[in-house]
Image (cartoon, rainbow, N blue to C red):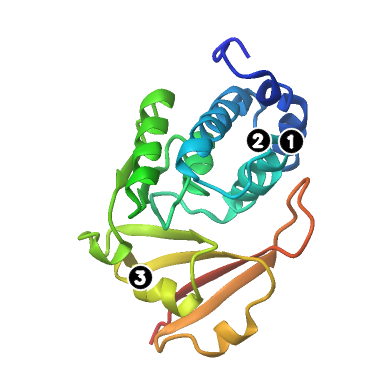
Amino acid sequence: MSSFPDLPGPISELAPRLRDGLRAFGLDEALVPSLLAYLALLQKWNGAYNLTAVRDPQQMLGLHLLDSLSILADVPKGDLIDIGSGAGLPGIPLAIVRPQLAVSLVEPVGKKARFLREVVRQLKLANVRVFDCRAEQVDEPGRYDCLSARALGSLAQLIAFGGHLLKPDGRLLAMKGQWPADELAVLPTGWVLERSRRLEVPEVEGERHLLVLKRETA
């Protein structure tokens, strides 16, 4: 933990459990200090900024860090845009563990966007930038290889919010709890479910699913 010596006790004590979680995803234990430093910032700012309803670091470990990293294997190379990023989930953890991934975080709530910029500054995340606007207002059509969204609206809404940002062959990664059969039944014309999988997240109970959507080819 020498890279981040000022971590609060309740955060630093999570290191062994985080190491176990990283092993489950085949990730390097050397990532522990950076991920815990992010978690420490999240806990510190959460009291004043109400970034997330989860306030116990013990729960944040699974529900935020490990949940975000559970989709890593499905994230393609290139540019990722994380819409409705909130406290930076899943965008910040993905950017930490994959520094070659260019990550854009979109968050319209000013105080949350300020928090995201502070995380980028303190953790020196050169591969991350922050948009403090709605996804519909991001004027970069067709730029991104991948769009991620966690707990943000229906599948149809995600496409409406950010579909224009994806390259023609880009992928939309939607993180869901229970299987969204009703949402899949009303996908907008031109979009299809490419694949899905049930997410197995260490320390997290309950259903978790990842749905990967793409544009329908002629």
Q: Secondary structure at mark 2?
A: loop
Q: Is residue 203 above or below residue 120?
A: below
Q: Position of residue 4 (x, y in %)?
A: 55, 15
- Give the distance between the C-alpha atoms of the residues marked 2 and 1, in whole angstroms: 6 Å
Indicate the quadrant containing the N terminus: top left, top right, bottom left or bottom right: top right
Q: Position of residue 82 (x, y in %)?
A: 42, 54
Q: Position of residue 153 (x, y in %)?
A: 49, 71
Which amino acid does the dot numbered 1 rest on?
A: Arg
Q: Earlier in the sequence, mark 2 or mark 3?
A: 2
- Give the distance between the C-alpha atoms of the residues marked 2 and 3, in whole angstroms: 32 Å
Residue under the image location 45 percent in, 51 percent down: 86
Which amino acid does the dot numbered 3 rest on?
A: Phe
Is residue 91 something one can see in this rendering? Answer: yes
- Report which residue position mark 2 lands on: 27
Residue closer to the observer: 57 or 145: 57
Q: Nearer the viewer, mark 2 or mark 3?
A: 3
Contact check, label 2 and label 1, Cβ < 8 Å? yes
Which amino acid does the dot numbered 2 rest on?
A: Leu
- Report which residue position mark 1 lands on: 23
Q: Position of residue 108 (x, y in %)?
A: 33, 55
Q: Is residue 183 above or below residue 206?
A: below
- Report which residue position mark 3 lands on: 161
